[in-house]
Amino acid sequence: MSFKPFKYALLAAGFGSAALLPFWSFAESAPAPKRERTEIHFSADQVEENSETKVITATGNVNIVREGTTLKADKITYDRKNDKITADGHVNIIQPDGTTVFADSAELEDKMSKGAIHEVKMILADESRVAARRIKQSENKNKYFFYGVYSPCDVCEDNPSPLWQIKARKITHDAANKDVYYQDAFIQIKDIPVFYTPFMSHPDPTVKRRSGFLPPSMRSTSYLGSSLELRYFWNISDHEDLLFSPLLSADQGVVWGGRYRKMLYNGELNLSGSYMKDKDTDENRYGIFANGRYEINDLWLGSFDINYASDSSYLKDLSLPGKTETWLTSHAALERFENRDYAAVEAYSYKLVSYSLKEYHASEFEKRDYSKPYILPLITYEHIGEANSYGAYFKNTVSTASVYRERDETKTQRATMINSWNLPYTSPYGEKYKFVASVKSDVYYIDKYVNDYDNSYTGAVGRVFPQAGLEWRLPFVKATESSRQIIEPIIVAVAAPNGGNKINKIPNEDSLNAQLDDTNILNLDRYNGYDRNDTGSRISYGFNWSSYGNIIGRTSMFIAQSYYFDEDESFSQSLGDNSHFSDYVGRVYASPASYLDFNYRFRIDRTDYSLKYNEINAKIGPNVLSAYIAFTSIKGRKDDRADSGLYFFDDYRERKELYTSIQAKISRDWRITAYNRQDLTKGSVGSLEHGGKIIYEDECFKLVFDIHKYNSTDPDYEDGYEYSATFLLKTLGGIGSN
């Protein structure tokens, strides 16, 4: 039985294991037994059936869609008795995951779930490519590629050879375990064999996590010498893993390291650390780092952050995160968030890991100045009341803290309450007012506090400090079709009593880093802690100017100054200033185009207009070629201890530092970066750190050369370097630095 050529399209239900269902099957006199039905889309230019052999032949633009798989060919022969399909000529199979197969011919059976394909080229779902003389798929869906080639690299007419590829006599894809195995395999770079292995394997592209060895990491540093880091990844579960990473170094032996991570239902946990025995000093050296958070319920959140190193040079020697820090801080907290209320119970611990402090304050180092503090507990409660019909609201803060210093056993216990009333108001003329009245009450118990005059004090101290402030603003707006300008004069008046800080009895633990700048000059309280009150009455004045537009971009400027009614008010004293007028502070920001971003902050001396504080951050250029510049200059002070000898920081000694970096995209695949961090202070070491990277990256390959050189300001730490190279074959892994 045969049919003349005709063009048709058919949507039908398949019976049994039939891969094709011709429309004439509905005309059979006897009903077919009830079987599993599969929907099939089928079209062709011509169909013929041999009634004796039950073989259907379809030719011309044959297209079959079944269970998400599409089969196209010039000719398809279907053996209905044996459920076999033979496809010839421009065979194209598109699978549900996006994998596309191109072949000369194919023999398929059992609903197209197994069979063989000849002279095959495949594009996988991740854009990787596979070619083989023959592919065979078994009943368990394992695929076997004979004389196969694998590469994730793009090819084109101008560049028909991929950057790298794997050629193997046999490639096996284990569908159940999602592994790919190679037998008699060569890794080729531009058709040049560079590595042979009789056997190798890796997870298939669908696997995101798998236990096993990761590519090793190689680098060379001044402390470790040449080193090789071996890494074994243990995928404990979908939400938990462990990385074991011993580092084998030529100069220091083995550095044992590892990392543990776990995602919790309402949080996360991260632990990492390393240990070594220094060959030169025979000392045990280690670092421990951990952090985590857990949402106990809708109201409570717990968190911790632990950072500890055995000595000041450990982080730098091993190039670990935090190597430039002066102090390592450990912190734990239990917080509650509910509507207008916030509560927290916290604990802090500090570890000094920079001897630059010791070098600068050598005479003071053995005193309590550098005695390591413990803060346990620090309790805070804040409540903001609802606004009344006039917009007024109350804000209440309660804080308690207990500080202990282990060297001299100094103890400080504090309880503070701040009650404030706030009233914002906007007049019919556009004037903006904000009135604040507050009362701060403190109770301290001090044990063995030694003040600046070497007098010791033990006992209880109380303070009550009232304060009131009024802020006035009047924005003037000028708008055009393409831009908008805003000029806003600002006046802030603060009334408060002078004196009463009792610096001879109350140590300064949390208000050390006093600095007058554009962020706090208009604040009611310019200290960042509770131990010092911002005493004295003053008036601050300045203005904001900003401009916005599609053509001109965004530009803004702010400048302000304060007038003190009392010369001996506490905050200016802490800055080493004794005048009615403060210095000028301000900032300038400009971003006229996407390739320019400029930010400048300053503090100018009120008398000679010299720069006491100078900070510039600028990004210039598009992504193809861009530069970043950061400059910081701080004028030193004769007495940087402020009103207390208890301070952690050396931020107020003279400092001039310039950081520059450049990034250039040479081509689509090549990038270069370089940087330099320079100490410009008189008598300094000059360049603190410099280095750069050369990066090549395309869709299948990444190569990174990384060079860093640094000069140390620590007397116990030598200058050093770090060289590393990364070679990565994407989808397979690589070797090099991590």
Image (tube, grey):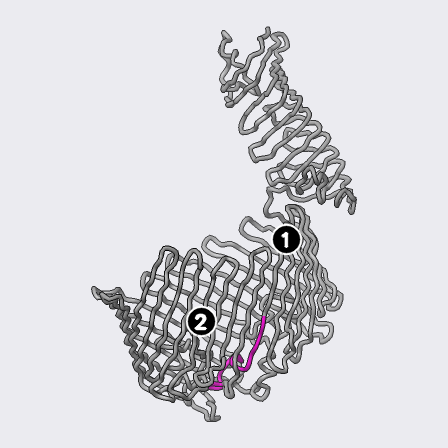
**Image location (x, y in percent) of residue 697:** 65, 51
Mark 1 vs mark 2: in front: 2
Q: Main secondary structure of the magenta part?
A: loop
Residue 722 percent coordinates (x, y): 69, 66
Residue at image location 65% in from the left, 54% down from the top: 666
Residue at (31, 85) in percent of width and height: 497
Residue 645 lies in the magenta-colored region: yes
Whole-percent x and y of residue 736?
70, 56
Where is residue 62, by image quadrant? top right
Q: Find residue 261 and report its horizontal and vertical position in percent.
A: 56, 57
Q: Is residue 38 left or right of residue 519?
A: right
Residue holding disc 2: 587
Per the rendered image, the range of residues in magenta is 641-658
Q: Which residue is mark 1?
A: 233
Is 414 on the left-hand or right-hand side of 409? left
Q: Residues within 10 Å of mark 2 (few under 14, many from 20)?
A: many
As drawn, 498 above or below 381? below
Near mark 1 (Cα within 10 A), the count class, few <14, some 14-19 or many ≥20, is some
Label 2, secondary structure: give it: strand
Q: Earlier in the sequence, mark 1 or mark 2?
A: 1
The answer to whether residue 90 is seen in the rendering is: yes
Q: Secondary structure at mark 1?
A: strand
Q: In the image, is 634 to the left or to the right of 255?
A: left
> Callout 2, which amino acid?
Arg
Q: Quadrant of the C terminus?
A: bottom right
Horizontally, residue 621 falls left or right of residue 478, namely right
Nearer-the-camera pick, 543 or 362: 543
- Distance from disc 1 to disc 2, alpha carbons, whole Å, reads 49 Å
